[in-house]
Image (cartoon, rainbow, N blue to C red):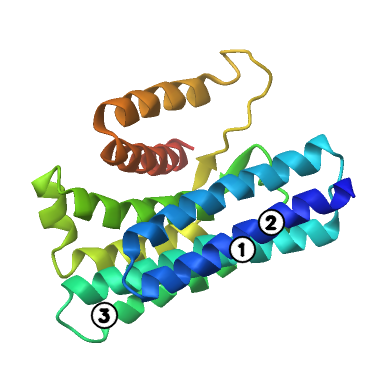
Amino acid sequence: MKKYIPNCLSLLNLTSGAIGTLLALNGHLIYAAYSIFVGACFDFLDGFAAKILRAQSSFGKQLDTLADLITFGMLPAAICYMLIKTYETCPNRPYFALLIIIFSALRLAKFTIDPRQVGQFIGLPTPANAMLIAILPIMLERSVYPFLVNALTHPMVLPLLTILLSYLLVSNIPFIALKFQGFSFQANRARYLLIVICTVLIVTMHIEGLFCSLCLYILHGVYKSKIG
């Protein structure tokens, strides 16, 4: 029976994404955002369980990819659509949100066949992209930093952010994978530093700190690609 446990966790990931999509399209964006974080937990657990139980399989890999497309593709696209619709006066711009699911599908297909993506990711990982989008309605609801709220509610910001994130998903920019190579500080220096900085940001700024951490993660990848 142990070989079915990772697949059940993948299905729970998919269910989180499906429920979250319905919540988003019905205007419950905060609960939809939480569904992404719940799905991310199941996504971590299914891979962890597969390794611990030695239950990895081609079927499980395909199921995991399909679940990720719903939770980290369809759901953030639905959140983006509703956010842009709320703050945009042009009736056509909310459809920019469709780029998220289209490019997430391309990103996931690329990930399954790209042998380079072992110690690093090529292109922004879909969970990181989805979590960044999930943070947006929570920050807008909290309104702790008015300058962030004013920036995000500007009519052009969310459509442009959608285009930028869609590009990052399929770009050739290398992003660090938090898979430690032993416990050596020298071999994992960037990972340790990134974790420490992000922890400080999250503890001091809470959800806005997580937003800044994800932005820092993206900037680190862009910087790394520039210096070769």
Disc ID at residue 14: 1
Residue type at numbered disc 2 = Ser
81 horizontally vs 56: left or right: left
Q: Measure the alpha-carbon separation of dots 2 and 3.
A: 33 Å
> Taking the image as drawn, is residue 109 in sight?
no
Q: Secondary structure at mark 3?
A: helix
Q: Is residue 55 above or below residue 187?
A: below
Q: Is residue 128 above or below residue 64?
A: above
Crowd around label 2: few <14 · some 14–19 · many ≥20 (10 Å)? many
Q: Nearer the viewer, mark 3 or mark 1?
A: 1
Query: x, y percentage for residue 201?
Result: 31, 29
The image position of residue 90, as x and y in percent, is 18, 83
Query: Hey, what amino acid is under mark 3?
Result: Arg
Q: Are marks 3 and 1 in contact (CB under 8 Å)?
A: no
User: Which residue type carries mark 1?
Assistant: Leu
Q: Earlier in the sequence, mark 2 or mark 3?
A: 2
Q: Tell me which residue sits at (32%, 26%) in the image.
A: 203
Q: Nearer the viewer, residue 179 or 189?
A: 179
Residue at numbered disc 3: 93
Does residue 152 sit above or below 2 in this rendering? below
> Picture quarter containing residue 16?
bottom right
Pointers 2 and 1 in contact (C-beta within 8 Å): yes
N-terminal-most mark, 3 or 1: 1
Q: Position of residue 144 (x, y in %)?
A: 15, 43
Label 1 neighbour load within 10 Å: few <14, some 14-19, many 20+: many
- Distance from disc 3 to disc 1, alpha carbons, whole Å, reads 28 Å
Query: Quarter of the image holding residue 205?
Result: top left
Q: Are marks 2 and 3 in contact (CB under 8 Å)?
A: no
Query: Which is more foreground, mark 2 or mark 3?
Result: 2
Which residue corresponds to mark 2? 10
Q: Secondary structure at mark 2?
A: helix
